Amino acid sequence: MDPVIIVGAGPVGLTLALALARQEVPCVVLDEGPGKDEQRLARTVVLREDTAALVARLTGLPLTDAGFRWAGWRSMRRKQVMREIDFAARASDTDSPDFEADAHGPGGAGRGAGGGAHGAMSGTQAFGGGAQAAGSGAQRSGGSARDPKGSAQSPKSAGLGSSADAQDSEGADAPAPLHLAQHALTGALREAIVHERLIKVAVGSRLDSIEQESSGVTAHTRGPNGTWWRGSYLVGCDGPRSTVRKLQDIRFPGRTAVERYAVAALRTELPWPGQALLHRMPPWRTSGPASGEVTARPLADDVWRLDWLLPPGKDLVTPDLLVARIRETLAGWNAGSTPPYELLDTGVHTVHHRLARRWRVRRVFLAGDAAHLLGALGTQGLDEGLRDADNLAWKLALAWHHGPHEALLDSYQAERRAVVAARLRAADQALPLLRSGGGLRSYVPGAARGHDALLTDGHLGRGPLGAPGVYADSPLAPAHTESETPVDTAPGAPVVDVRVTAEDGSFVQLRERLGRGVLLVVLIAPGTGVWARKHWVTAGIMPRLAAAVTALPHRAELLVAESYPGAAAHTVLLVRPDGHLVTALSGVRPADLYAAAETTLGGPATAEAEAETAASTT
């Protein structure tokens, strides 16, 4: 059977290629560029727990070597610390509640910072950059983002107030986001592809036509390697100006320039080593247009990315204006004295909100920036693009190996477009509130803390603005049965990454078994972690459950966990290849388990699909 053609070699396209190859599906990646990425420290991405784990699983590389996990998060309004989260304490002490503080302060309003300067929904325009020394000099004193004991001033000594002592446990179990330069992420994906026999990358290949037939897709590229390519399916991961989307005549409505930021990457020390900061309504005077918000996000090696929210309009951001803004901001955070810093890169980041009308036209699909643009209020468009790839990969793999199943392939648009549309609605509803900047809303008690909570959700990937999507209304959701039992994970939501015992007796994390194109059946059996697998694998309900798993309509792996949040003993979880919960059953229910698995696969296979599969293998 012909390979899957992937148009675009950005993070989403490369992730999709690796995800398909892990499921034995060959791919051709059409890369319009030279096969290398420009190194830009002002173009960064923030990965949440699920997307960071997805990339790490596919590349086999520890992304923490290329990026930086924040030690904490703090948000401020004027001189007051509104909220503080200590990720370092969370990582070192799992038995104590995580710390998150809310300061008691007056009402107010603010706006959230955008995502990465080259997130899935934005563009970054450079004007200067390079290893330009500025400020008080290019040298830096002791301490680093990795070393919280450096010589930088504390926030209190810098005159920026102190942390509050009120605790808020909402979202306390969220891990630290991973912040890295986009070229580092793409480089890790490219390195993994070099060793993958099922992936071919064609550089200098610019798509200019697509032809579809009932049996496949033909694409033509121009350039040094211009030729015709034959594929089983084609996925457009070619960015906001997607050629694939235009060739398929798919509308891309939405809003232009929802937010705009001036961006600078610099090496310096700040009073809160390793902590990301959102500062609304900073109290110091600024040159040029006032910035109601500035965000500081640490990278590795003492590098920080700073984003200043720009007022509406198209005012030119000059290098001189940005350097002045850098000096004023650093001085404001350091009791009036600008510390030494080295300016590494600059740019302007513009956030757009758009959503393609269709994500599938027969054998052609859209993913990532080609399908949606978002990124306001600290949300990360790339997160959603990577989730697109994870959702689509196992469905295309099933279609490639077993013949097309229309209901299964259609579910990609039904699930992913609904999630992104909900994310866009949440951001569009929050923007007017956070942009008001005054009026009666600013005098409502608790308004400032409510605004801060919205912005924190966006930046940390939780709540309606940032949490991974739930496919509650998916066409792949099975009908309710009396054997269903509640657990803390809702059907359609991502499962919790608990430790499980695999079929070979090894202990692994549940997330490590994802992405292989198989269904996962997890039995909750307290005490199994104490005894060797050979002592319980043939005892109790295990033989009956193993037989039920073997009889499922698709290959499945039986795993055993000692516990799962909210699950009683002998609960059986059915998990999709992308890690979303299908259902939780009370005990071994072979008929209900089979029905749920069949629905998850799109229902019974059609005669047409079986005939096409037979034809393709002869």
Image: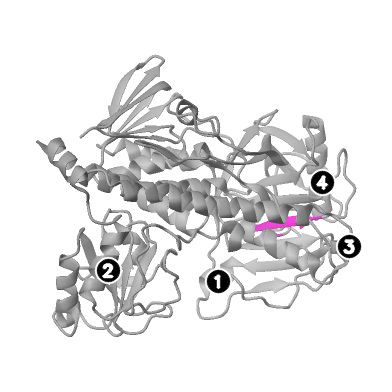
Identify the residue under disc 1: 90
State which tag comes first along the sequence, 1 or 4.
1
Quarter assignment of residue 546? bottom left
Mark 1 or mark 2: whose residue is earlier in sequence: 1
Q: Can residue 389 be seen in this view?
A: yes
Which numbered disc, 4 or 3, marks the residue that appears first in the sequence? 4
Instruction: Name the disc covering residue 440, or none.
Output: 3
The residue tagged 2 is 521
Disc on res. 479: none
Q: Is 223 left, or right, of 330 in this rendering?
A: left
Q: Which one is closest to the eye, mark 3 or mark 2? A: 3
* 485 relative position to 88: left or right: left
Gap in Å between the C-alphas at discs 3 and 1? 38 Å
For marks 3 and 2, the one nearer the N-term is: 3
Taking depth in this image into account, of 317 and 565 the one nearest to the observer is 565
* Residue 113 x, y percent position in the rendering: 69, 50
Residues in magenta, as a range: 272-280
